[in-house]
Structures are given as C-alpha cells and as structure tokens.
Image: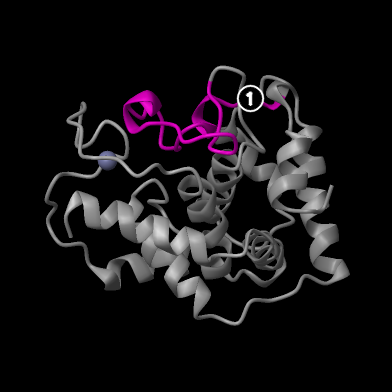
Amino acid sequence: MTHDEGVAAARAAVARVDPAAVGAAFVVSLATRRLDLRSALGSYAVGRHLPEHPFRQGMAGCRVCGLYERDTPISVTELDHERRTWGGVRHEDPRYVAFDLTEFLSTPQPVPGERDVALCRSVLAALRALPPATTAAKAGPALRMVPGNKHERDVLLEILGYCGILQTDAHRGFADGFVEHDDRAQRNTDLAYPIRWWKAGDGVNDTNVARFLAVA
Ligand SMILES: [Zn+2]
C-alpha cells in the first residue's frame, strides 16, 4: 500500500462510521472485554480529522501521518491479533485505522445497557479522583473495575487520550484537529501521544466525554 492509498483508505473508512456507534461500542467493551469493539473509538478519533495530503518527508516517514511513501506490506493477521488482544496498538497508523474501522463496520454494533454506562462513568470518576501528580502510566491500577490486564488498561487510557478526554493544554488529543506525526514527537515512555504527557491534575475533559461517549 502506498502512502496515498493508506491515507485514502483511512479517510474512506472514517467517513462510513457513525460516531455514536463507536462511542457506544467502547462503552460496551468495558464490561464485556470485547477489545475489538474498544479499538474502533481510537481509530475513529485519530482518523476523523486526518487530512488528504501528499507525502511530506518528516523525521520518520511522512511528517503529517507517519506513513512511508511506499511501505513494506502490513500483515492483516497481525493487525487482527492486535485488535482482538489489546484493543489495537497502532491507532496512529492510517492503515490500522482503515482496517479496524472496516472490520468494525462488518460487526454487529451493540447498544450499551445501564450496567455498561455505569461502568464507564465509574472509570471516569476513578480518573478524576486520582492524586493530581498521578501519571497515566500509574493510573492503570485505579481502573481494576474494568476486567482485563495492564496492557489492555494502558490501551484504554491511550484511546481516551486520542479522544482528548485525557489530554493536557500543551499536548492535545485529536478531538479538535489532526495532530501531525512530527508534532507528536518521539515516545519517551511506553504510552502513546498525548496520554504520555497526561497527569491526573490535567483532569478529564467533559466536552470530549460528551462528544465521544455520551455518558456525561
Ligand atoms: Zn502522510
């Protein structure tokens, strides 16, 4: 897949997705541990403002989206495994966005029940209640009410970061606009942009909770 094909595939998949459906699937994923359903919100958040653009050489790959002009083929089996096992690990890759959302569109899209909404609210409440200096890397244990392991909870936090539900003033998620690959800079922890910069004192962004999860 070329750069332009990857960008076009991601944009086309995003355009077909109902924003309310990805939010609902995320909420349902918490209690059910349906990581495939959880992943779609991250892909949608990253992809929704991905601009059509030509390849522009950056620090590594395209400075806008990170793709190479002509990349080595990506294994669909691997992407599928990542999606089902962790809820996705490369939401920032337009090829994953395209794959994930295309799969999502072919899956029955669930409606959250009261229990699902309550669990989502308790996750947000737990994040709000953390001591202000708590980093995202240390926030996972507070989310033990969500069935799953540490890696799954880290991805959950990353997805909330992409949505701008967890963001900082200086390092914002993708809710209001696309953040270019080079502006996300190098990883300095195991966590993705922008969650690696977030501390509990930065708070939970209610505007983006309402925008993406509809459980405010
Ligand atoms: Zn690009």
Left or right side of 97 for 39? right
* Rendered residue at 80%/58% (across/down): 119
Q: Main secondary structure of the magenta part?
A: loop
* Viewer-side residue, 163 vs 186: 163
Q: Quadrant of ligand 1?
A: top left
* Rendered residue at 85%/59% (across/down): 118
* Viewer-side residue, 81 vs 16: 16
Q: Position of residue 16 (x, y in %)?
A: 51, 66
Assess whether residue 196 is covered by the magenta stretch: yes
Assess whether residue 12 is covered by the magenta stretch: no
* Rendered residue at 88%/68% (across/down): 114
Q: Quadrant of residue 112?
A: bottom right
Q: Position of residue 175 (x, y in %)?
A: 59, 38
Which element carries disc 1, helix, strand or loop? Answer: loop
* Viewer-side residue, 215 vs 77: 215
Q: Quadrant of residue 131?
A: top right
* Rendered residue at 62%/69% (across/down): 33
Q: Which residues are magenta?
A: 171-200
Left or right side of 75 for 122? right
Q: Position of residue 46 (x, y in %)?
A: 48, 46
Return the residue at label 1. 199
Q: Position of residue 105 (x, y in %)?
A: 51, 74
Amino acid type, label 1: Lys
Render colour scheme: one colour
Residue 188 appearing in the image: no
Q: Quadrant of the N terminus?
A: bottom left
Residue 55 appearing in the image: yes
